[in-house]
Image (cartoon, rainbow, N blue to C red):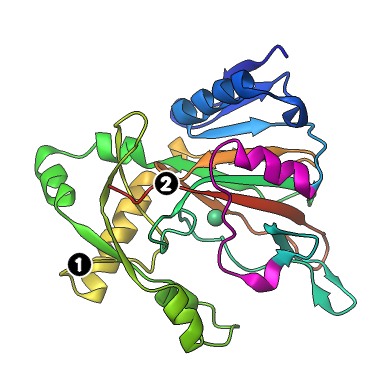
Amino acid sequence: MAIAIRPLGEHVGAEATGVDVRAIGPAETERLLDALTRHGVLVLRDQTMTPDDLVAFGRRFGPVEYGVREDYQLPENKDVYVISNIVENGRPLGNPNDGFAWHTDLSFLEHPTAYTFLYAIECPPEGAQTEFASAFRTYDALDAQERARLDAMRVLHSYDMLHKTRKWAAPLSEDQKAKFPDVVHPMVRTHPVTGRKSVYLGPNTSLPIGMGEAEGAALIAELMDRTTDPRHVHAHDWRPGDLVVWDNRGMVHRATEYDKARYRRLMHRVTVRGERPF
Ligand SMILES: [Fe+2]
Protein backbone atom coordinates (compact mmCIF):
# COMPACT_ATOMS: atom_id res chain seq x y z
CA MET A 1 0.00 0.00 0.00
CA ALA A 2 1.60 3.31 -1.11
CA ILE A 3 0.34 5.76 1.49
CA ALA A 4 0.95 9.46 0.88
CA ILE A 5 0.33 12.17 3.50
CA ARG A 6 -0.49 15.73 2.41
CA PRO A 7 -0.92 18.51 4.99
CA LEU A 8 -4.18 20.45 4.65
CA GLY A 9 -3.27 23.50 6.71
CA GLU A 10 -0.56 25.15 8.75
CA HIS A 11 -1.81 23.99 12.14
CA VAL A 12 -4.49 21.38 11.49
CA GLY A 13 -5.15 18.45 9.25
CA ALA A 14 -3.65 16.10 6.68
CA GLU A 15 -5.09 13.86 4.01
CA ALA A 16 -3.85 10.31 3.59
CA THR A 17 -4.23 8.83 0.12
CA GLY A 18 -3.57 5.31 -1.14
CA VAL A 19 -5.25 3.76 1.88
CA ASP A 20 -7.94 1.11 2.10
CA VAL A 21 -8.54 0.98 5.84
CA ARG A 22 -10.01 -2.53 5.59
CA ALA A 23 -6.71 -3.91 4.31
CA ILE A 24 -4.06 -2.20 6.42
CA GLY A 25 -1.54 -3.89 8.68
CA PRO A 26 0.55 -2.71 11.64
CA ALA A 27 3.08 -0.74 9.54
CA GLU A 28 0.35 1.24 7.77
CA THR A 29 -1.42 1.82 11.08
CA GLU A 30 1.81 3.27 12.51
CA ARG A 31 2.14 5.57 9.51
CA LEU A 32 -1.44 6.83 9.93
CA LEU A 33 -1.05 7.23 13.69
CA ASP A 34 2.11 9.25 13.18
CA ALA A 35 0.33 11.55 10.70
CA LEU A 36 -2.62 11.90 13.07
CA THR A 37 -0.30 12.80 15.94
CA ARG A 38 1.52 15.40 13.84
CA HIS A 39 -1.53 16.99 12.22
CA GLY A 40 -4.34 16.37 14.73
CA VAL A 41 -6.88 15.51 12.03
CA LEU A 42 -6.55 12.84 9.35
CA VAL A 43 -8.84 12.66 6.31
CA LEU A 44 -9.25 9.40 4.35
CA ARG A 45 -11.58 9.64 1.37
CA ASP A 46 -13.38 7.05 -0.75
CA GLN A 47 -13.57 4.37 1.93
CA THR A 48 -16.14 1.57 1.84
CA MET A 49 -16.76 0.36 5.37
CA THR A 50 -19.35 -1.66 7.22
CA PRO A 51 -19.95 -0.77 10.88
CA ASP A 52 -17.74 -3.75 11.81
CA ASP A 53 -14.93 -2.45 9.56
CA LEU A 54 -15.13 0.94 11.28
CA VAL A 55 -14.93 -0.61 14.75
CA ALA A 56 -12.05 -2.89 13.68
CA PHE A 57 -10.15 0.12 12.35
CA GLY A 58 -10.77 2.04 15.58
CA ARG A 59 -9.45 -0.89 17.65
CA ARG A 60 -6.08 -0.55 15.91
CA PHE A 61 -5.70 2.78 17.75
CA GLY A 62 -6.84 1.68 21.22
CA PRO A 63 -9.84 0.46 23.21
CA VAL A 64 -13.12 1.32 21.53
CA GLU A 65 -15.53 2.63 24.10
CA TYR A 66 -19.10 3.56 23.43
CA GLY A 67 -19.95 7.02 24.75
CA VAL A 68 -23.03 8.01 26.64
CA ARG A 69 -26.20 8.14 24.56
CA GLU A 70 -27.46 4.56 24.41
CA ASP A 71 -30.52 5.77 22.51
CA TYR A 72 -28.28 6.41 19.48
CA GLN A 73 -26.34 3.15 19.40
CA LEU A 74 -26.43 1.31 16.11
CA PRO A 75 -28.59 -1.76 16.86
CA GLU A 76 -26.37 -4.18 14.88
CA ASN A 77 -23.11 -2.92 16.38
CA LYS A 78 -23.37 -1.16 19.70
CA ASP A 79 -19.85 0.28 19.50
CA VAL A 80 -21.12 2.60 16.76
CA TYR A 81 -22.86 5.86 17.63
CA VAL A 82 -25.15 7.27 14.97
CA ILE A 83 -25.42 10.95 14.08
CA SER A 84 -28.40 11.58 11.83
CA ASN A 85 -31.57 13.56 11.26
CA ILE A 86 -33.29 10.60 9.59
CA VAL A 87 -36.40 9.17 11.24
CA GLU A 88 -37.51 5.70 10.12
CA ASN A 89 -40.82 4.20 11.25
CA GLY A 90 -41.03 6.85 13.94
CA ARG A 91 -37.55 6.02 15.32
CA PRO A 92 -34.70 8.57 14.97
CA LEU A 93 -31.71 6.71 13.52
CA GLY A 94 -29.28 8.95 15.37
CA ASN A 95 -28.58 12.11 17.30
CA PRO A 96 -29.52 15.19 15.21
CA ASN A 97 -28.83 17.83 17.84
CA ASP A 98 -25.40 17.74 19.44
CA GLY A 99 -21.95 18.93 18.46
CA PHE A 100 -22.80 22.37 17.04
CA ALA A 101 -20.76 24.23 19.68
CA TRP A 102 -16.95 23.93 19.79
CA HIS A 103 -15.81 21.10 22.05
CA THR A 104 -13.66 18.02 22.51
CA ASP A 105 -15.38 14.65 22.72
CA LEU A 106 -16.51 13.17 26.02
CA SER A 107 -14.27 15.38 28.16
CA PHE A 108 -16.57 14.68 31.13
CA LEU A 109 -15.26 11.11 31.39
CA GLU A 110 -12.38 10.26 33.71
CA HIS A 111 -10.62 8.79 30.66
CA PRO A 112 -11.93 10.99 27.83
CA THR A 113 -11.87 10.07 24.18
CA ALA A 114 -8.44 10.16 22.56
CA TYR A 115 -9.47 9.48 18.96
CA THR A 116 -12.80 9.98 17.22
CA PHE A 117 -13.55 8.25 13.91
CA LEU A 118 -16.39 9.71 11.87
CA TYR A 119 -17.55 8.00 8.68
CA ALA A 120 -19.98 9.58 6.23
CA ILE A 121 -22.72 7.51 4.64
CA GLU A 122 -25.13 10.27 3.55
CA CYS A 123 -24.21 13.96 3.44
CA PRO A 124 -26.10 17.16 2.64
CA PRO A 125 -24.64 18.94 -0.41
CA GLU A 126 -24.27 22.16 1.62
CA GLY A 127 -23.61 22.88 5.29
CA ALA A 128 -22.96 20.03 7.74
CA GLN A 129 -19.21 20.54 7.74
CA THR A 130 -16.95 19.58 10.60
CA GLU A 131 -14.59 22.37 11.63
CA PHE A 132 -11.33 21.81 13.49
CA ALA A 133 -8.90 24.07 15.33
CA SER A 134 -5.69 23.55 17.28
CA ALA A 135 -5.52 24.23 21.02
CA PHE A 136 -1.74 23.65 20.85
CA ARG A 137 -1.52 26.91 18.94
CA THR A 138 -3.49 28.64 21.72
CA TYR A 139 -1.09 27.41 24.38
CA ASP A 140 1.98 28.29 22.33
CA ALA A 141 0.72 31.89 22.00
CA LEU A 142 0.20 32.46 25.76
CA ASP A 143 2.54 34.89 27.48
CA ALA A 144 4.53 33.72 30.51
CA GLN A 145 2.05 35.11 33.02
CA GLU A 146 -1.01 33.51 31.38
CA ARG A 147 0.89 30.27 30.98
CA ALA A 148 1.74 30.13 34.69
CA ARG A 149 -1.86 30.90 35.63
CA LEU A 150 -3.39 28.30 33.31
CA ASP A 151 -0.72 25.68 34.09
CA ALA A 152 -1.94 25.70 37.70
CA MET A 153 -5.65 25.66 36.88
CA ARG A 154 -7.99 22.69 37.19
CA VAL A 155 -11.37 22.46 35.52
CA LEU A 156 -14.61 20.70 36.41
CA HIS A 157 -16.17 18.78 33.51
CA SER A 158 -19.75 17.75 34.20
CA TYR A 159 -22.02 15.63 32.04
CA ASP A 160 -24.96 16.80 34.12
CA MET A 161 -24.15 20.45 33.37
CA LEU A 162 -23.76 19.68 29.67
CA HIS A 163 -26.99 17.71 29.59
CA LYS A 164 -28.93 20.59 31.17
CA THR A 165 -28.21 22.66 28.04
CA ARG A 166 -30.27 20.13 26.03
CA LYS A 167 -33.57 21.89 26.48
CA TRP A 168 -35.38 19.21 24.49
CA ALA A 169 -34.23 16.32 26.71
CA ALA A 170 -35.51 14.91 29.99
CA PRO A 171 -33.17 15.52 32.97
CA LEU A 172 -30.61 12.83 33.78
CA SER A 173 -31.84 10.08 36.08
CA GLU A 174 -30.01 9.40 39.34
CA ASP A 175 -28.62 6.24 37.71
CA GLN A 176 -27.22 8.23 34.79
CA LYS A 177 -25.73 10.81 37.13
CA ALA A 178 -24.07 8.03 39.13
CA LYS A 179 -22.70 6.51 35.90
CA PHE A 180 -21.14 9.81 34.77
CA PRO A 181 -19.96 11.66 37.89
CA ASP A 182 -18.30 15.05 37.56
CA VAL A 183 -14.54 14.93 36.92
CA VAL A 184 -11.70 17.40 37.28
CA HIS A 185 -9.05 17.71 34.56
CA PRO A 186 -6.09 20.07 34.18
CA MET A 187 -6.67 23.20 32.10
CA VAL A 188 -3.36 22.56 30.37
CA ARG A 189 -3.05 19.10 28.91
CA THR A 190 0.15 17.35 27.85
CA HIS A 191 0.03 15.17 24.75
CA PRO A 192 1.21 11.71 25.85
CA VAL A 193 3.20 11.04 22.66
CA THR A 194 4.77 14.40 21.79
CA GLY A 195 4.77 16.12 25.22
CA ARG A 196 3.26 19.17 23.54
CA LYS A 197 0.89 21.24 25.67
CA SER A 198 -2.56 22.51 24.77
CA VAL A 199 -5.44 24.17 26.57
CA TYR A 200 -7.95 21.39 27.21
CA LEU A 201 -11.36 22.79 26.37
CA GLY A 202 -14.39 20.56 26.75
CA PRO A 203 -17.80 22.00 26.05
CA ASN A 204 -18.70 25.50 27.20
CA THR A 205 -20.27 24.02 30.33
CA SER A 206 -16.92 23.17 31.94
CA LEU A 207 -15.94 25.32 34.91
CA PRO A 208 -12.51 26.25 36.29
CA ILE A 209 -12.17 25.29 39.96
CA GLY A 210 -12.28 28.26 42.32
CA MET A 211 -13.96 30.62 39.85
CA GLY A 212 -17.54 31.84 39.87
CA GLU A 213 -19.80 30.57 37.10
CA ALA A 214 -19.81 33.80 35.07
CA GLU A 215 -16.08 34.42 35.43
CA GLY A 216 -15.27 30.78 34.63
CA ALA A 217 -17.57 30.72 31.59
CA ALA A 218 -15.99 33.96 30.33
CA LEU A 219 -12.49 32.46 30.59
CA ILE A 220 -13.49 29.25 28.78
CA ALA A 221 -15.25 31.30 26.09
CA GLU A 222 -12.24 33.55 25.63
CA LEU A 223 -9.83 30.64 25.29
CA MET A 224 -12.19 28.95 22.86
CA ASP A 225 -12.46 32.17 20.82
CA ARG A 226 -8.70 32.41 20.57
CA THR A 227 -8.44 28.73 19.61
CA THR A 228 -11.10 28.99 16.92
CA ASP A 229 -9.85 32.15 15.24
CA PRO A 230 -11.36 31.70 11.75
CA ARG A 231 -7.95 32.27 10.16
CA HIS A 232 -6.78 29.01 11.71
CA VAL A 233 -9.84 26.79 11.35
CA HIS A 234 -9.88 23.84 8.97
CA ALA A 235 -13.37 22.98 7.66
CA HIS A 236 -14.02 19.53 6.26
CA ASP A 237 -16.62 19.32 3.48
CA TRP A 238 -18.05 15.83 3.68
CA ARG A 239 -18.60 13.41 0.82
CA PRO A 240 -20.06 9.93 1.25
CA GLY A 241 -17.18 7.52 1.92
CA ASP A 242 -15.12 10.03 3.88
CA LEU A 243 -13.54 8.86 7.10
CA VAL A 244 -12.12 11.60 9.30
CA VAL A 245 -10.13 10.81 12.44
CA TRP A 246 -9.12 13.37 15.03
CA ASP A 247 -7.05 13.48 18.19
CA ASN A 248 -9.06 15.17 20.93
CA ARG A 249 -5.85 15.78 22.90
CA GLY A 250 -5.12 19.13 21.28
CA MET A 251 -7.92 19.62 18.74
CA VAL A 252 -11.37 21.15 19.19
CA HIS A 253 -14.17 20.69 16.68
CA ARG A 254 -17.78 21.48 15.91
CA ALA A 255 -20.44 20.63 13.34
CA THR A 256 -21.95 23.37 11.22
CA GLU A 257 -25.69 23.58 10.69
CA TYR A 258 -27.57 22.32 7.65
CA ASP A 259 -31.12 22.34 6.36
CA LYS A 260 -32.53 19.36 8.27
CA ALA A 261 -35.93 19.60 6.62
CA ARG A 262 -34.39 19.35 3.17
CA TYR A 263 -31.35 17.07 3.46
CA ARG A 264 -30.49 13.72 5.00
CA ARG A 265 -27.35 13.18 7.02
CA LEU A 266 -26.12 9.78 8.24
CA MET A 267 -22.76 9.41 10.00
CA HIS A 268 -21.25 6.58 12.02
CA ARG A 269 -18.93 7.42 14.90
CA VAL A 270 -16.51 5.30 16.89
CA THR A 271 -14.53 6.61 19.87
CA VAL A 272 -11.29 5.29 21.34
CA ARG A 273 -10.66 5.84 25.03
CA GLY A 274 -7.58 7.79 26.04
CA GLU A 275 -5.47 8.24 29.16
CA ARG A 276 -6.49 10.31 32.15
CA PRO A 277 -5.53 13.88 31.16
CA PHE A 278 -2.29 15.17 32.72
FE1 LIG B 1 -17.83 15.95 18.88
In the drawing, does residue 57 fall left or right of residue 219? right
Cα–Cα span, label 1 and label 2:
23 Å
- Circle 1 — which element? loop
32 vs 72: above or below: above
Are there few (<14), some (14-19), or many (20+) residues within 10 Å of tag 1? some
Q: Nearer the viewer, residue 206 or 50?
A: 50
Image location of residue 102, percent across then percent down = 47, 56
Instruction: Check disc 1 and report the residue beneath it.
Output: 209
- Residue visible at 46% across and 88% down? 174
Q: Answer with left or right where residue 8 lies relative to residue 202.
A: right
Residue nearest the observer in this picture, 203 or 193: 193
Which of the numbered marks, if any, corresponds to residue 228?
A: 2
Q: Label 1 amino acid?
A: Ile
Image height check: is 243 above or below 128?
above
Amino acid type shown at disc 2: Thr
Give the mark nearer the N terminus: 1 vs 2: 1
Kindly tell me whether residue 236 is visible in this rendering: no
Tell me if label 1 and label 2 are in contact, CB under 8 Å.
no
Residue at 70 percent of width and 21 percent of height: 17
Q: Is residue 67 magenta?
A: yes
Q: Residue at x 69, y 46 (%)?
A: 55
Q: Which residues are magenta?
A: 51-72
Count of marks placed on residues: 2
Q: Secondary structure at mark 2?
A: loop
On the rendering, which quadrant does ligand 1 occupy? bottom right
Q: Is residue 47 above or below residue 171?
A: above
Q: Position of residue 137 (x, y in %)?
A: 33, 35
